[in-house]
């Protein structure tokens, strides 16, 4: 067995409600840390409405950190794209998804590379809200309808199809860009890239969704 990483160097990297990268150090003197939207959570994701008030816990066991859900959350907790059904001992590089917030666990405090498409590896039908799925489907509608020389639907077209305001569509798209790890692409490339990834991941098929 290889040497285990010292938990004193463990931390989580994630983006806050403004899209800025944040780091939370996991203090080894703590026995248990909570993740949730509710007041009093050690990792307080108050901006993410898809995170439960008490969503998951991190437990310090020996030299490791263990992620625990135990049915606490409504939308589930995902590690490397798989829904967490048991306790999971975290390893350097693991990607955690709670609500619509993606976190990268690092055992040496080295932030994830800006070129790493973290969110692309964890987006599943189950990890998206119903509204987010509808936004993606509407965005891809011109392609599924078989239109020649199709381009992604506009914000107004999406809003008209699923009965949302244009501002709400923009907010959902911003979250989806982050989920798929494409928020740093030039603005004129994000929508087409999201369409490509939606088809590639099976979120939208060639048939009308």
Image (cartoon, grey):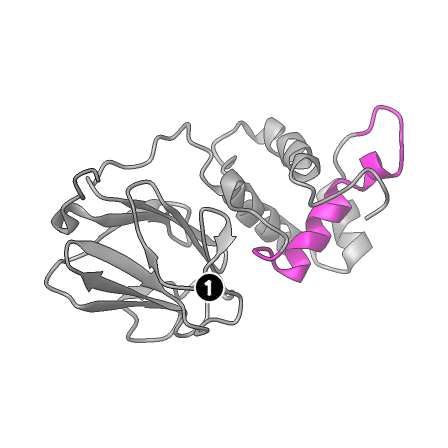
Residue 178: where, in percent of width, then height?
Answer: 50, 43
Residue at the far left in the pictured view: 29
**Residue at image mark 1:** 85
Decide if residue 206 is on the left or right side of residue 24.
Answer: right
Q: Quadrant of residue 56?
A: bottom left
Decide if residue 9 is on the left or right side of residue 161.
Answer: left
Range drawn in magenta:
126-150
Q: Residue at x 47, y 34 (%)?
A: 117
Density class for disc 1 (Cα within 10 Å; few <14, some 14-19, many ≥20) is few
Residue 150: where, in percent of width, then height?
Answer: 82, 29
Question: Is residue 76 part of the magenta span, yes or no?
Answer: no
Residue 177: where, in percent of width, then height?
Answer: 55, 41
Closer to us: 173 or 50: 50
145 w.r.t. 69: above or below: above
Q: Quadrant of residue 153?
A: top right
Count of numbered circles on the image: 1
Q: Residue at x 69, y 45 (%)?
A: 203
Q: Residue at x 42, y 54 (%)?
A: 17
């Amino acid at each position: 067995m290889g040497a285990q990483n010292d938990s004193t160097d463990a931390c989580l990297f994630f983006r806050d409600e403004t899209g800025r990268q944040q780091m939370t150090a996991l203090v080894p003197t703590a026995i248990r840390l909570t993740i949730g939207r509710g007041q009093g959570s050690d990792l307080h994701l108050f901006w993410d409405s898809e995170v439960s008030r008490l969503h998951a816990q991190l437990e310090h066991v020996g030299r490791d950190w263990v992620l625990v859900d135990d049915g606490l959350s409504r939308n589930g907790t995902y590690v490397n794209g798989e829904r967490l059904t048991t306790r999971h001992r975290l390893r350097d590089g693991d990607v955690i998804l709670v609500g619509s917030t993606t976190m990268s666990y690092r055992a040496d405090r080295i932030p994830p590379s800006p070129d790493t498409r973290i969110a692309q590896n964890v987006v599943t039908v189950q990890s998206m809200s119903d509204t987010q799925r509808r936004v993606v489907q509407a965005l891809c509608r011109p392609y599924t309808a078989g239109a020649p020389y199709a381009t992604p639907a506009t914000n107004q077209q999406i809003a008209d199809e699923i009965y949302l305001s244009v501002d709400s569509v923009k907010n959902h798209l911003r979250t989806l860009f982050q989920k798929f790890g494409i928020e740093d692409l030039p603005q004129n490339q994000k929508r087409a890239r999201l369409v490509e990834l939606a088809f590639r991941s099976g979120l939208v098929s060639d048939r009308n969704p």
